[in-house]
Image: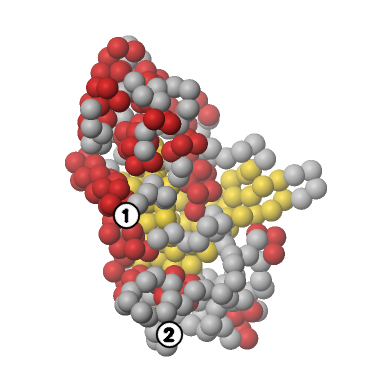
C-alpha cells in the first residue's frame, strides 16, 4: 500500500528575468514499511526533491505536479496544515547536522521542542522524553549529554540527535538525506543499523537519499536512480545492482571499488547545469554507449523488464559489463 506518491513533480526557480526548471516530471512512490533509495551524483536534484515534499522550498522556487501523502496533496494544502504534518507524520534527517542543529541551544531542548510544538507537552516532561529518545538512539550517558551543545558532540552523536528529533513523534515517513555523509565506516554502519531497527519497530517508511550505491545495497528495498532532474531507472535493489538497464547506473556501479588492484571506471564529465542540458538524452554527452539517435529525442521512462523501468533507447540490450 502506497504511503507517499510523487506524481510528475517539476521544480524550478524564477527571477525577474528568467525561470529555470531543475526537476522535470519526477514520479516515485514509497510503500508502507518500505525503504526507497533515491540515488545520484551531487547536483542531480535529490535534496531538492526532499525539500519539495517537506514544503521547504525557498520563496523564489515553484513546484508543479502532485505529492500525495496518505491521499492528501502536500502541494495544495495550506502552510498551517503542512506545518502540523512536518515533524509529526513526515520527518527529515538533514544532510549536515552541524548546520541543521541550533548551535546556541542544548541538544536536549532541541529534541524537547518537538514534543512541545506538536503535543503541547510541558518543558519538564518534554526534556524527560528527550532523554529517553537519546537512549533509544544509543547515546551514552544521555542524562548528562542532554545538557550539551552541538559543538560538544562528535559528528556521529550529532547525527543521532538529528535522528532522535526526526523520530520523536513516531512519523509514518522518514526522509533521510545523506545521513551518513562525513562519518567514518564504523559510525556509518551504526547509523544504518539504527535506521533499520527504527523502521522495523514502527513499520516506518523511509525515503533514503544518497550517492553511495554501497549503502543502497545494505538498506533499501527499491531504488530510483536520478540524473539531471530526471528519474532514469527504477527497480528493486537486486535488479539495480545485478542487472542495471541504464548506462548512468552502470557507470555508478563501475566507479565502486570491487577487487583489490582493479582500476575504477569513473564517469567522464560532470552533471550538466539545468540551463545547459544536452539535446536528446540528458546523459548522452557522458555515455559510452551513445548513438546518433540519443542526441535527437529524450527517451521516455519505459519498462525494460517486468517491474524494471529505464529511460534509455538501448535498455533492452545487454550493455552491462560490455
**Residue at image x 33%, y 37%?**
157
Q: Which residue is the site of mark 1? A: 185
Residue 125, compared with residue 162, is above or below; it is above
The residue shown at (37%, 49%) is: 183
Dot 2 and dot 1 residues touching (CB under 8 Å): no
The answer to which quarter of the image holds residue 228 is bottom right
The residues tagged by marks 2 and 1 sit, at their Cα atoms, a distance apart of 32 Å
Query: What crowding class fits label 1: few (fewer than 14 Cα within 10 Å), some (14-19), or many (20 or more)?
Result: few
Camera-side mark, 2 or 1:
1
Along the line of sight, the residue nearer the viewer: 180 or 222: 180
**Residue placed furthest toward the left:** 201
Q: Is residue 248 visible?
A: yes
Q: SS class of the residue under badge 2?
A: loop
Disc 2 target residue: 319
Q: Position of residue 182 (x, y in %)?
A: 42, 50
Q: Which mark is residue 150?
A: none
Q: Is residue 76 visible?
A: no
Q: Residue furthest right?
A: 17
**Residue at point 42% right, 88% down?**
322
Amino acid at each position: 500500500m502506497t504511503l507517499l506518491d510523487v506524481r510528475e513533480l517539476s521544480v524550478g526557480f524564477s527571477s525577474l528575468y528568467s525561470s529555470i526548471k531543475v526537476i522535470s516530471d519526477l514520479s516515485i512512490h514509497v510503500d508502507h514499511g518500505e525503504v526507497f533509495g533515491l540515488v545520484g551524483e551531487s547536483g542531480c536534484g535529490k535534496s531538492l526533491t526532499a525539500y519539495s515534499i517537506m514544503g521547504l522550498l525557498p520563496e523564489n522556487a515553484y513546484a508543479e505536479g502532485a505529492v500525495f501523502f496518505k491521499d492528501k496533496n502536500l502541494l495544495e494544502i495550506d502552510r498551517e496544515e503542512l506545518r502540523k504534518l512536518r515533524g509529526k507524520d513526515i520527518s527529515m534527517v538533514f544532510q549536515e547536522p552541524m548546520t541543521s542543529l541550533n548551535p546556541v541551544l542544548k541538544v536536549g531542548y532541541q529534541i524537547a521542542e518537538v514534543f512541545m510544538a506538536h503535543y503541547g507537552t510541558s518543558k519538564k516532561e518534554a526534556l524527560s522524553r528527550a532523554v529517553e529518545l537519546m537512549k533509544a538512539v544509543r547515546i551514552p550517558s544521555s542524562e548528562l549529554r542532554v545538557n550539551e551543545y552541538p559543538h560538544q558532540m562528535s559528528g556521529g552523536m550529532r547525527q543521532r540527535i538529528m535522528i532522535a528529533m526526526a523520530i520523536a513523534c513516531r512519523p509514518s515517513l522518514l526522509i533521510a538525506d545523506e545521513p551518513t555523509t562525513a562519518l567514518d565506516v564504523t559510525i556509518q554502519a551504526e547509523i544504518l543499523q539504527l535506521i533499520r531497527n527504527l523502521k522495523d519497530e514502527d513499520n516506518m517508511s523511509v525515503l533514503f537519499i544518497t550517492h553511495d550505491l554501497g549503502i543502497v545495497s545494505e538498506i533499501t528495498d527499491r531504488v530510483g536512480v536520478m540524473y539531471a532532474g530526471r528519474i532514469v531507472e527504477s527497480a528493486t535493489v537486486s535488479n539495480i545492482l545485478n542487472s542495471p538497464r541504464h548506462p548512468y547506473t552502470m557507470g555508478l556501479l563501475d566507479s565502486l571499488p570491487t577487487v583489490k588492484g582493479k582500476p575504477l571506471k569513473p564517469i567522464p564529465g560532470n552533471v550538466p547545469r539545468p540551463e545547459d542540458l544536452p539535446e536528446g538524452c540528458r546523459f548522452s554527452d557522458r555515455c559510452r554507449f551513445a548513438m546518433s539517435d540519443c542526441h535527437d529525442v529524450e527517451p521516455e521512462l519505459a519498462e525494460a523488464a517486468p517491474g524494471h523501468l529505464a529511460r534509455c533507447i538501448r535498455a533492452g540490450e545487454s550493455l552491462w559489463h560490455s
